[in-house]
Image: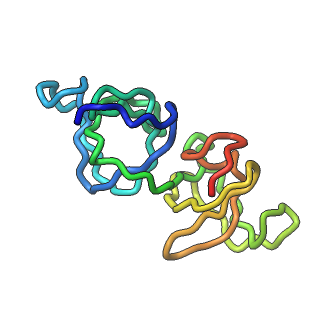
């Protein structure tokens, strides 16, 4: 116990629980800086120290989380930086395909596949394809399978 994962850093993961303490450093002795209250939010792991992961959220805030509070399940937020501009949810991975919905910035969904330009993006109320550059939780050009 106490080893890093050996997985690439940085990488995206998601929060496993509805209450995740974010600490100022990589031990339980460090104070809780803030608490996430929404399971499934995407976060970016920017460093590892033993069983702790330094994470960054979509707003750029960073802190340390115990590894068991994170899931490898990929999720993403619709362009939180776009301030009010909805992202089209297409029926196929093409701008010429029909638009099934317009997703507001901050909408959370699951990502199961991305080809580097488009991601299959869904939740219980929607399913379709979003241009990869409109999502926070996947890297530009990243292939997700």
Choose top left, top right, bottom left or bottom right for residue 24.
Answer: top left
The residue lying at 70 percent from left, 64 percent from top is 129
Residue at the outermost left position = 29
The residue lying at 36 percent from left, 30 percent from top is 54
Q: Nearer the viewer, residue 26 or 124?
A: 26
Quadrant of the image for the C terminus? Answer: bottom right
Compared with 67, 97 (above or below) is below
Q: Nearer the viewer, residue 145 or 13?
A: 145
Where is residue 5? Give x, y as percent. 39, 37
Q: Is residue 91 left or right of residue 68?
A: right
The residue lying at 14 percent from left, 31 percent from top is 28
Q: Is residue 90 left or right of residue 19?
A: right
Residue at the outermost right position = 96
Q: Is residue 43 left or right of residue 89?
A: left
Q: Nearer the viewer, residue 29 or 88?
A: 29
Compared with 68, 119 (above or below) is below
Applied colour scheme: rainbow
Choose top left, top right, bottom left or bottom right for residue 88.
Answer: bottom right
Quadrant of the image for the N terminus? Answer: top left
The residue lying at 50 percent from left, 43 percent from top is 12
Q: How many marks?
A: 0
Where is residue 69? Give x, y as percent. 28, 48
Compared with 2, 138 (above or below) is below
Where is residue 19? Give x, y as percent. 23, 51
């Amino acid at each position: 116990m106490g080893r890093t994962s050996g997985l690439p850093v940085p990488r995206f993961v998601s929060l496993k629980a509805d209450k995740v303490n974010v600490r100022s450093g990589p031990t339980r002795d460090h104070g809780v800086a803030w608490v996430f209250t929404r399971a499934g939010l995407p976060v970016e792991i920017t460093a590892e120290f033993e069983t702790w992961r330094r994470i960054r959220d979509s707003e750029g805030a960073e802190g340390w989380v115990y590894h068991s509070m994170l899931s490898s399940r990929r999720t993403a937020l619709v362009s939180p930086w776009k301030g009010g501009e909805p992202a089209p949810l297409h029926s196929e991975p093409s701008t010429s395909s029909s638009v099934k919905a317009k997703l507001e910035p901050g909408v959370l969904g699951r990502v199961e596949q991305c080809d580097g330009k488009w991601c299959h993006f869904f939740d219980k109320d929607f399913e379709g394809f979003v241009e990869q550059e409109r999502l926070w939780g996947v890297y530009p050009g990243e292939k997700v399978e």
